Image (cartoon, grey):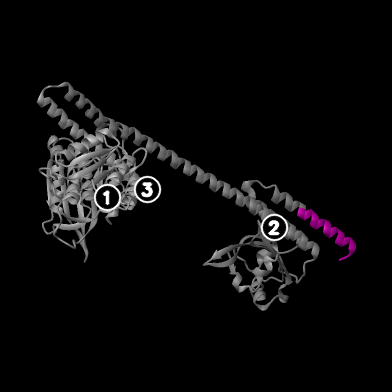
């Protein structure tokens, strides 16, 4: 090429770079593809080549491939064998390409001068000459930019290579901006979704707090009101009726508190089962007796159908199973109008070598549930309809807790229902075959046991709790000493290690808590045979384990059950 022609050609190349820069670097966010195509057209026409392509790196079956994503064709290029968009090749089949490109080297050669395998791959598409330049995005090798001539064998000059290298950098810049736009868009979408989820959760929990406040204040109002009535009355019948209503409201309030505690265990993934051998018949009798009064109040027709071929004894958590069934029955009673029909059924679903799978069903003729509301039925904090919640009450926790308990028992829970016709809730649970069919029944005391001559140290900082425990212990003829915190308990035991036969220890107390007091009592070295039993409202599994780790021998949960106290005395004072 003559010197004057070379000078003009360089100017042509520079003008092409300038035009490409204007197209690529000033493109709007939504015009990235159009800008890339325009840039390839400028390169192709300036260099008089037939194809301009951009290939992106992609993983295919854990193998790095180059995939053709963008292409410009000259009129001649359109008549040649098509290189289809999406065509891919493996770098493992192109010897040394990755290493060369990572070093930012390029390929510039007539096809006939390439190694045979490369010449065969590229020559199939009727190429005569090719240039391949690697593309980098934030120093990461992302693919390559190629041009090929289908008419002439040629070696592209340095000026042409500089022009292509400059354009390649601009292509990478467009991809970088496009990538950043996608990341920002995805981030905004994720933030919007997270915000909506947070707002939904906040609304659900706000509704829950409003509901739970109402549900807790209602029995509290009854307790306070009936207490005032009993205090103001001299009529034994009025006092007795008031105490009965106080007891009923207290148990209802305790049920609500237990539901909230169960909810917190579920959210912390700490809910566990207490496995023991139990009688199905006794469990069913207990459930029926517990719900009998509520059924009679609404004059419901209640039937129970237990498969007569089912065995009676199982290993499982009878208390939690009772909780599930009672929750379903309570809902059926609440949401079924007067004179309705409710049915409880138990049948075999499956049986294995070491287990039974039982199916429980609770059917009613109540208000039913529409299809669109059924999906939210077992979600935490959810109540299907605010007006229904106000009319019938409830915390919106029962079914969510039931679902988690059923899942812990390797089962599933679901519902079949039609609005205004009724519902059938059903669930399955897996129960083990009992290793010892002779169940150890829990003793129920008709009269308190007696332990004259025995001495108990009661450690409790709250006066009303001391009064309750003192009233229970008084019936057993033990001598009781009082300590109002862990420091006083440690002092009492330190002065006379052999004086006490049992220590009943609260946990959360001022000055020194029960765990620290127990650890120091054990550190005395003379109290290894002294039983220390926790009496505490800390009833989670972790709480019990902490008590045992501190050196305690047992655990009684608050509210205190008389039978639990008497069992403890029998165990350690007999």
Q: Crowding near pointer 1: few (<14 within 10 Å), some, many (20+)?
A: some
Q: Secondary structure at mark 3?
A: loop
Q: Position of residue 52 (x, y in %)?
A: 68, 62
Residue in the picture at 53% in, 67% down: 62
Give the farthest residue toward the front: 495
Horizontal relation, residue 448 to residue 553: left or right: left
Residue wearing tag 3: 268
Q: Earlier in the sequence, mark 1 or mark 2?
A: 2
Which residue is at the front of the view, 327 or 449? 449
Q: Position of residue 138 (x, y in %)?
A: 65, 56
Q: Which residue is mark 2?
A: 40
Local secondary structure at mark 2? helix
Q: Nearer the viewer, mark 2 or mark 3?
A: 3
Which quadrant is home to the N terminus? bottom right
Mark positioned earlier in the residue sequence (2 or 3): 2
* Residue at 19% over, 31% down: 246
């Amino acid at each position: 090429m003559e010197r004057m022609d070379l000078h003009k050609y360089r100017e042509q190349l520079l003008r092409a770079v300038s035009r490409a820069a204007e197209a690529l670097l000033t493109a709007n966010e939504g015009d990235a593809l159009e800008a890339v195509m325009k840039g390839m057209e400028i390169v192709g026409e300036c260099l008089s080549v037939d194809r301009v392509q951009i290939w992106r790196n992609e993983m295919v079956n854990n193998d790095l491939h180059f995939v053709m994503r963008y292409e410009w064709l000259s009129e001649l290029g359109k008549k040649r064998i098509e290189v289809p968009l999406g065509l891919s090749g493996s770098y493992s089949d192109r010897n040394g390409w990755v290493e060369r490109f990572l070093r930012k080297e390029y390929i510039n050669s007539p096809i006939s001068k390439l190694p045979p395998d490369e010449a065969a791959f590229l020559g199939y598409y009727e190429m005569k000459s090719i240039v391949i330049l690697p593309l980098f995005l934030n120093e990461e090798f992302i693919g390559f930019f190629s041009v090929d001539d289908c008419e002439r064998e040629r070696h592209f000059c340095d000026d042409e290579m500089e022009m292509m290298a400059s354009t390649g950098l601009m292509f990478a810049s467009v991809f970088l901006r496009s990538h950043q736009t996608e990341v920002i868009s995805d981030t905004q979408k994720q933030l919007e979704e997270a915000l909506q989820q947070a707002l939904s959760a906040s609304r659900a929990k706000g509704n829950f707090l409003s509901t739970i406040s109402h549900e807790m204040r209602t029995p509290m109002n009854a307790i306070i009101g009936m207490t005032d009535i009993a205090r103001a009355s001299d009529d034994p019948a009025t006092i007795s009726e008031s105490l009965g209503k106080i007891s009923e409201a207290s148990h209802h309030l305790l049920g609500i508190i237990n539901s909230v505690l169960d909810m917190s265990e579920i959210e912390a993934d700490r809910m566990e089962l207490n496995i023991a051998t139990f009688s199905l018949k006794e469990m069913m009798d207990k459930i029926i007796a517990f719900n009998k009064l509520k059924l009679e109040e609404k004059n419901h027709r209640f039937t129970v159908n237990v498969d007569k071929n089912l065995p009676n004894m199982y290993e499982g958590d009878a208390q939690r199973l009772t909780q599930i069934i009672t929750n379903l029955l309570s809902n059926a009673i609440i949401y079924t109008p007067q004179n309705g029909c409710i049915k409880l059924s138990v049948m075999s679903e499956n049986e294995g070598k070491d287990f039974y799978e039982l199916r429980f069903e609770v059917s009613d003729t109540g208000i039913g549930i529409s299809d669109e509301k059924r999906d939210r039925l077992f979600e935490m904090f959810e109540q299907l309809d605010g007006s229904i919640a106000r009319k019938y009450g409830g915390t919106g926790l029962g079914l969510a807790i039931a679902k988690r308990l059923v899942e812990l028992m390797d089962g599933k829970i679901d519902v079949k229902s039609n609005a205004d016709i009724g519902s059938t809730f059903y669930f399955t649970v897996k129960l083990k075959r009992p290793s010892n069919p002779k169940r150890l029944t829990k003793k129920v005391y008709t009269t308190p046991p007696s332990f004259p001559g025995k001495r108990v140290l009661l450690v409790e900082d709250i006066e009303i709790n001391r009064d309750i425990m003192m009233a229970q212990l008084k019936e057993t003829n033990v001598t009781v000493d009082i300590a109002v915190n862990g420091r006083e308990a440690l002092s009492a035991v330190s002065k006379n290690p052999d004086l006490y036969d049992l220590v009943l220890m609260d946990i959360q107390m001022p000055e020194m808590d029960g765990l620290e007091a127990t650890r120091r009592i054990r550190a005395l070295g003379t109290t290894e045979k002294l039983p220390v039993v926790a009496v505490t409202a800390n009833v989670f599994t972790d709480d019990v384990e902490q008590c045992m780790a501190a050196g305690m021998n047992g655990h009684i949960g608050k509210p205190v059950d008389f039978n639990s106290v008497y069992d403890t005395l029998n165990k350690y004072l007999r």
